Structures are given as structure tokens and as C-alpha cells.
Amino acid sequence: MSKELVYVTRGNLVESIHRGDLVIVNSKGEVLAYVGDPFKVTYVRSSAKPIQAINVFLSGAYEKFNFTYDEIAIMCASHFGEDYHIETIIKILKKIGVSEDSLLCGGGYSINKDIALKQARDNIKITPVYSDCSGKHAGIIASCIAKGYDIKGYNLISHPVQRDILKVVSKMCEIKEEDIIIGIDGCTVPVFGMPIFNLALAFAKIANPDKLDNNYRFAASVIFNSMNSYPQMVSGTGGFCTELMKNTKGKLIGKLGAEAVYAVGIKDLDIGIAVKIEDGNFRALYPVVIKILESLNILDDEEKNTLKEFTVMDNKNSIGEKVGEIKPIFTI
């Protein structure tokens, strides 16, 4: 059963309760701690992007197109569609020799509401490059080209590039392909359903890849370093993923997934973390992640102070006044 993780207060009253599940593992597959169900099954959504990006290396696309760290980082991203994101996506598309019409993710305003309002005010023409998943799609197309696959229908589970990605996810998460539940993600590509344990395991291995096969080890190392070198690519200005990596001195990676999934891989300590908020509400997610990191003594005082806005979040009214808090209440 999912456990109570976060209280939302208004004045002296607990007005809402968010329940969820979390698990902490090492790269050997040992469960170190958990709250709720460590084997809660959910779609891992965009938290899987750093895992999926490994196929960019296995396919030969990384070497063929000489991808840079910022380009790899945005392939792992759920980006905000800021100018530097769009410029990076366009740079990738030019490298691989396709137009943005090849992207099958659809268009969409920024997932950051303030940036989305600015895009609307500025009458920005929203095209597929603005999708928060356009980096992942560009990486998948690059893998198709490197392998000699037709890019038509690259978003279908029957396409050979998606079968390749499924094999990567299966290997990194240590779950049989036939046991992965396949759905369709918001951006039209396959999405993977599995226990959160397996997601945490993959992130432990990305952050601590020494025991992986050579090609996987190299890919994981570059992905980890890319996300830390360009954290602004992974979400954007003020985004939780960006702020978490920007302010933790290269010790971890973190990646958001829709419906309030989060995964963290911690370097050197051999730790992977996965969280799922039962009701899918993001307001509960960030305090949970920070509380876990604090409980594990991952964050020093400076990092705690820099990330304090995510630790106990303000519950505000329509004019921006604090009327309560969004705070974690669990212990590990």
C-alpha cells in the first residue's frame, strides 16, 4: 500500500494528503530502504530518458554525428522550450540531416507555465521542436540513421529502433522484455511500465557504471557527465532537475517523469532512488526527493540552503501570500 508522504496545510489544518511509494537500491539490486511498496508498478514516463539515450551510443549515432555534451543532455531532457533548447534541437537536426517535420512528438507550449504564457504573448509558432520530448525524438532518429533504419514510424513499438531501445531498458533495469508493460507516452513513443525498484536500479548503474559492459559503461558515463555539465538542458530555468544537478557538484543525476515519477542516481555511493506519487501531483514530488537526499546525508549545508525552496514548499493564495505549506512527513 502507498504511504502518506506529504501534507498540504492551510493555516493549522492539513487540507490534503499525498500518498506514494519510494525505494532506494544499489547497483547489485539490493533494496537499502523503502517507504510504501518498493515494487510499485507504474509507467516510468520521462524518467526513462537517460536510460533510452544509451541506445544513441550503442547504435553508433554518438560517434557518427560527433554529438556534444549539450546535445546528449537534451536527449535526456523534458525541456522548457527556451531559446537555447530550441537552438540545440535545431543543431542536432542539422547534424543528422533531417527537418523538424520528421519529429513525431507533436508540438506544444512549454511545460513551464510562465514560459508557456510568454510564448503565447509573443505569438510563437509552436512546432515539434518546442515539445519537451523533442531531444529524445531527435536522438531516436539519429539512431535510426546510424543503423540504416527507415525513420518512418520510428515511434511504433514494432519499429526496429524501438525494439533496440526495449532491449536497453530491459538490460539496464534487469527486467525481462516480456514483463515490461508497454503503453503509449504523451509524445507518441512507447512508454515502459515496471516496478519502481527496476527504475531505481538502472539509475544506480548509470551513476556507478564500473561493472557494466564496455559499451554500456561508456554510454552511462557520458550521459551522467552530460547531464551534470549542462543541467539547464534537462529542464530549464528554475526547473527542479536543473536546480538539483546544478547545485550538487556533480554527485548525482535526477530525472522527472510525468504523473509525478522521479529517479535519482548518486555517484560513488552506489545508490539509485525512484519515487512515485500516487495521485500524480508534482507539488508533492520535489519535497519527497529532497527529504530522501537529506535523510541519506547526500546534501551538505550549502546544498540544502540552495535547494530549500523545494524542501518545504509554500502553499500560496491568489496574490502570492503564504497560507500554508507542502511538506514531507515520512521517515526512512
Image (tube, rainbow, N blue to C red):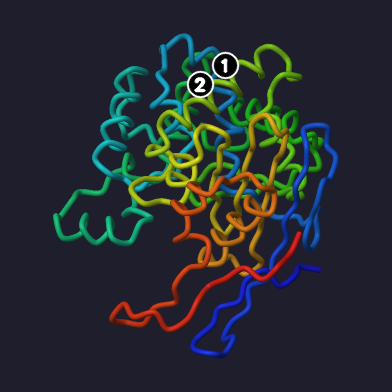
Q: Residue furthest top?
A: 64
The quarter of the rendered structure image containing the N terminus is bottom right
Quick one: 53 or 239, which is closer to the camera? Answer: 239
Task: Inspect the image, locate mark 1, and give the three-letter code of the amino acid beneath it.
Answer: Ser
Residue ID for mark 2? 144
The quarter of the rendered structure image containing the C terminus is bottom right
Task: Inspect the image, locate mark 2, and give the three-letter code of the amino acid beneath it.
Answer: Cys
Q: Secondary structure at mark 1?
A: loop
Residue ID for mark 1? 59
Rendering coords of residue 84 (x, y %) = 27, 36
Rendering coords of residue 90 (x, y %) = 28, 29
Relative to residue 5, is residue 169 depicted above or below? Answer: above
Is label 1 in contact with label 2 (beta carbons under 8 Å)?
A: yes
Give the side of residue 131 with respect to residue 136, left or right.
left
Give the side of residue 126 with respect to residue 285, left or right.
left
Rendering coords of residue 188 (x, y %) = 50, 46
Relative to residue 217, is residue 283 depicted above or below? Answer: below
Which residue shows up at 61% across the image and 33% down it?
51
Quick one: 37 or 300, which is closer to the camera? Answer: 300
Q: Secondary structure at mark 2?
A: helix
Q: Earlier in the sequence, mark 1 or mark 2?
A: 1
Which residue shows up at 47% across the image and 54% down it?
305
Give the side of residue 326 with respect to residue 80, left or right.
right
Rendering coords of residue 137 (x, y %) = 45, 34
Quick one: 150 or 169, which is closer to the camera? Answer: 169
